[in-house]
Image (spheres, rainbow, N blue to C red):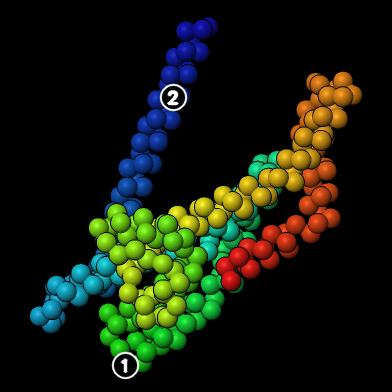
Amino acid sequence: MKTKNNVLFRKKIMKLGIGFMLSFIVLILLLGVISQGVSAESPSIKIDLNSGAADSGSSTLDLLFLLAFIALIPTFLMMLTCFTRIIISFSFLRNAMGVANSPPNQVIVGLSLFVSIFIMFPVFSQIKTEAYDPYKAGTIELEEALEEGQKPLKVFMLKQVYDEDLNMFMTLANTNEIIEMEEYDSQDKLTELSLFIIAPAFITSELKRAFLIGFLLYIPFLIIDLVVSSTLMAMGMMMLPPAMISMPFKLMLFIVADGWNLLIESLIISFN
């Protein structure tokens, strides 16, 4: 009986395999017929980057540079604006409160993005007025528009840069000049510095300020942790995790103090 069952089972497997192979062959044939019909009926579109004027090579390079610039826009948004300080401050707040995933990363990133847009809106408006609108109207060339568009961004970044950070990158760039921020009151002098020196100095200064804000955020929650752990130890409850008891008190302190408004308001004021 077992041999008969095995033979029947093998026959069924062979039939299923043959049916699957036939179905697969028919499907390939149908796809081939459909693709031939589509290729025969649909019009073809060809793009030739080397046709046209004599300067087609330069236009191709301009197109490649434009695509590379568009790909780097998120990096510029994070590094050359106030986004870095804000998102690091929110992350320190979440760690100080002891809540690992609340609010989630999507909420933190979204809130940081919209607060950054709120802070950077005057700078973006000035770039649009002084660079984009004249370039769109045809009154200035692309190189001049890029140069004019950098000026408001440089002014914003230099207002947040520490003197020692700026001088460090100028020294590493083999520039013998020592900069004092008080000397750069006018916009003309601000634009003399290169963006490749201002940007890393700005990022370094933003990281320093963000970690300083994180240290200040930790202090009240650390005091609550110390008080709760000392109380539990005095009561002999050494096996009870202090974080479990201190969490409601941290949340209550943050809610009573209206922590979100205080933190966001302090961050916005710190850029002024």
Q: Residues within 10 Å of mark 1 (few under 14, many from 20)?
A: few
Report which quarter residue 135 is drawn in: bottom left
**Which is more foreground, mark 1 or mark 2?**
1
| Left or right of residue 45: residue 236 | right
Depth order, front residue of 74/247: 247
Q: What residue is drawn where x is 37% and y is 81%?
A: 188
Q: Residue at x 83, y 49 (%)?
A: 252
Q: Which mark is residue 37?
A: none
Q: Which is more toward the observer, 132 or 20? A: 132
- Tell which circle, 1 or 2, labels the residue nearer the N-terminal end: 2
Determine crowd level at label 2: few under 14, some 14-19, many 20+ residues with C-alpha closer than 10 A: few
Image location of residue 53, percent across then percent down: 13, 82
The kind of secondary structure element at disc 1 is loop
Image-based side of 44 in relation to 269, left or right: left
Relative to residue 110, is residue 153 depicted above or below?
A: below
267 versus 222 height, above or below:
below
Q: Quadrant of residue 56?
A: bottom left
What is the x, y in percent for residue 200? Answer: 39, 58
Residue at mark 2:
13
Question: Residue type at mark 2?
Answer: Ile
Q: Position of residue 55 (x, y in %)?
A: 13, 78
Answer above or below: position of 35 versus 50.
above
Q: Residue at x 50, y 53 (%)?
A: 207
Q: Residue at x 80, y 21 (%)?
A: 239
Q: Which residue is mark 1?
A: 139
